[in-house]
Amino acid sequence: MDNWPLYLLLVLAIGIGWWLGRRERLKSLKPVGSNYYQGLSHLLNEMPDRAVTPFVEDLEVTRDTLETHLALGSLLRRRGELEKAVVVHENILATAKLEIDAVLNVQLELARDYLLAGLLDRAESLLMVLIQKSGRVRTESLKLMLEIYEQEKEWQGAIEMGQFLAVGDGTEKYESAISHYYCEMAESLLQHGKLAQSREMIREAIGHDANNARVSLVLGRIELELGNYSDAIRVLRRIYDQDAVYVVESLDMLKLAYSANAAPGSIDGANREVFKQYLLQCLKRTSSISIVLVIAELIEIEQDAEAGAKFIANHLKLNPTVRGLTQLIDLHIDKARGVSRQNLLILQSFAEALIADKAAYRCQRCGFGGTKMRWHCPSCKRWGSIEPIFGLEGE
């Protein structure tokens, strides 16, 4: 009992310490103005355009509120409000005292804003700094740099970025992309008549993806330009093993190569039979009306128009397509007379209208559809994912 004054003083000291600490915490809390709650209300009611100013002006950027600011910036970017997203992210960098990792993440978000807004120079300047870092920030920055180079068609820069990214699980994806970058350069050189340089680019493309059917298509064009028809045929026939769905893209060049030494517009007997057998082989793997029509042309040369039409009709019984129907009508319409001819013309116009605006190609990754062949999907940005559509309204 002699120590009770000491115990009393100890309890009193603890109480005073608690009270002082609580008072300091209350003083340190900055009152949140009504603008913040107004901004929060707009944000929750999907009105981010009216939420930006209250948030930026009234909600201080701290480690505790950083996620709120980033969420608002991300929401604005997804809605296409890119200028406002830039304001939010620039405000964070200008006013906040954050750890280095947080700063790098905000800079990465700002670079995304710049990229989507078309401010490629600003995005590139910022990303060139970020790719010197490590970890996730470096990887994401390399991807964004790659996207910039693709937009600007700076294929050599895209190749360099792709090589950095072609590691681990991303190897196959980026090696395929690099192969297409070399094909892009090869096609550009080919258009300017620089055949030797174009061939060099194709060699590089093969080294990154030997199964890229586009490589064979471009190399086939080079051989045709050089008059190497046998080599062109050999190269173009590789597509059957690489990816048979792209055989349809090689048909015009094959017809030209096989008919090179024959009379204009025809193919001599030996080449015709070899060509036909190859196409029949392709038809077993991919049911394409384009292949059927070329075979029908060859049969018509060998026999007559009726035999060619019969071949088309037999194929359509098993694999009906609107395009095949229009071709079959066209083969019979000249022989029809009177009411029969009028009915065929009406049927032909309806069939052509059905496929007039229909997509002929579709991305196998995201479903994007288009009327012409693209090697780079404008929607998901994947290379080599677009293929001809097969079915009633396609091949």
Image: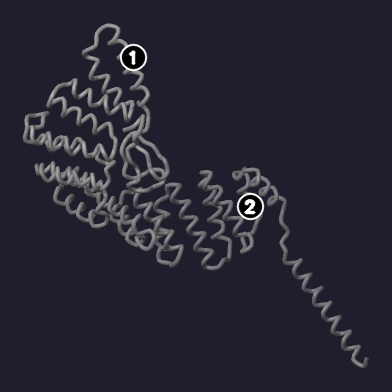
Marks 2 and 1: which is nearer the front?
Answer: 1
Q: Is residue 31 visible?
A: yes
Q: Quadrant of residue 389?
A: top left
- Count of labels in the image: 2
Q: Is residue 129 left or right of residue 223?
A: right
- Across and down, in percent, residue 315 comes to 27, 29
The N terminus, quarter of image: bottom right
Which residue position is annotated with label 1? Answer: 346
Q: CA distance from mark 2 to mark 1?
A: 63 Å
Looking at the image, which is closer to me, 146 or 306?
Answer: 306
Q: Up-down: is 261 above or below 65?
A: above
- The amino acid marked with disc number 2 is Phe
Looking at the image, which is closer to me, 210 or 66?
Answer: 210
Q: Residue at x 30, y 10 (%)?
A: 342
In terms of secondary structure, where does tag 1 sit?
helix
Q: Earlier in the sequence, mark 2 or mark 1?
A: 2
Q: Quadrant of residue 49?
A: top right
Which residue position is annotated with label 2? Answer: 55
